[in-house]
Image (spheres, rainbow, N blue to C red):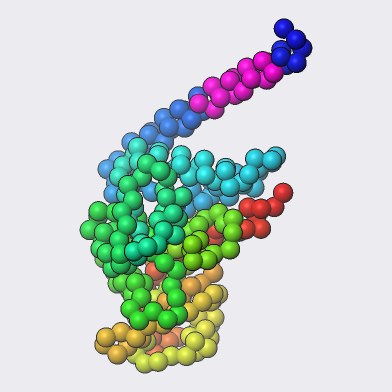
Amino acid sequence: MPLEDKALTDLRRRIDEIDAQLHDLLMQRTEVVQSIGAAKGDVASHSRPGREAEVLRRLIARHRGPLPKALIVRIWREMFAALTALQGKLAVAVYAPEGTFGYRNLARDQYGWRTPITAYRSAAQVLEAVADGRATVGVLPIPRGDEANPWWRNLASTGDSVAKIVARLPFAAVAPPNTDNPEALVISLDGPEPTGGDCAFLLIETREVASRSHLRGLLAEASFEVLDIWVSQEDSGQYLHLIEVGGWVADDDARLESLAALGEGTISQVWSGGGYAVPLSIEVMTAP
């Protein structure tokens, strides 16, 4: 055999050996995941977007070589979805107005090719599918400032059937958002979990119109870093505000009680609306 042919044969044999090692490790990972599922017992959902974010951050931080980072994310996202489904139900409801595909593509990228994904024409249908258990998670649009009846108003409540925001999509950005490549929020009956790099949402109900500057002042006094504010007038005449803040906010965060006290006379109620692990930026994903 010519030396060149022998060299190629040896390299291909090495690839076969590596493939076998990768396959062995994948089967081992599956066994460990199933053991975790057995330890958890009978729970409603095994989806862990916070934990998945931590894993991807760690992998991207240690990645070297010419293999695109986006491919690393794609491989692990498929693995996350498949192994989550082995532990229990995983089904997705996605907002998808007729003639649009952006949110469905986001959902498929996040939850893998085998996961059942059902498209709904309205946000209300997505919320209902999550609330009644037909869907484990729902994918909904990022809030806008010009919405007459925004879907996030449904987060201003408490109870086992009230969803919370648990993730932001895409988690690994490779291009700026646009109509065909939108951003979205994920809701679930299972609340979010802290990852060490998070943003959160608060819902504040006021008895009358409250300026953004006034709310920002109250929030800053309660030690919240305000990132954005959306407002919607309720049928009762009161106003509901969705506030995006930096950092993790638990349901029992003492700052929520402090905020309500500081806004006495203006604020009637405060809720925690969930949160998300801060996604990997375009700069991180495209850096050499």
- Could you say where residue 47 lies in the image, as x and y percent from the top left? 38, 48
- Which residue is at a point 50% across and 61% down the rendered structure image? 181
- Could you say where residue 266 lies in the image, as x and y percent from the top left? 39, 90
Pick the quarter of the image with the N terminus: top right
Task: Give the quarter of the image for residue 188.
Answer: bottom left
- Which residue is at a point 37% across and 41% down the rendered structure image? 114
- Could you say where residue 92 lies in the image, as x and y percent from the top left? 34, 53
User: In the rendered image of this protein, does residue 35 appear above or below residue 236?
Assistant: above
* Residue 19 forms part of the magenta stretch: yes
Residue 279 visible from this viewpoint = yes
User: In the rendered image of this protein, does residue 242 appear above or below residue 177?
Assistant: below
Along the line of sight, the residue nearer the viewer: 230 or 243? 230
- Which residue is at a point 27% across and 86% down the rendered structure image? 235
- Which residue is at a point 63% across and 44% down the rendered structure image? 68
Helix, strand or loop: magenta stretch:
helix
Q: Along the horizontal axis of the image, is 134 left or right of 258?
A: left
Residues in magenta, as a range: 8-23
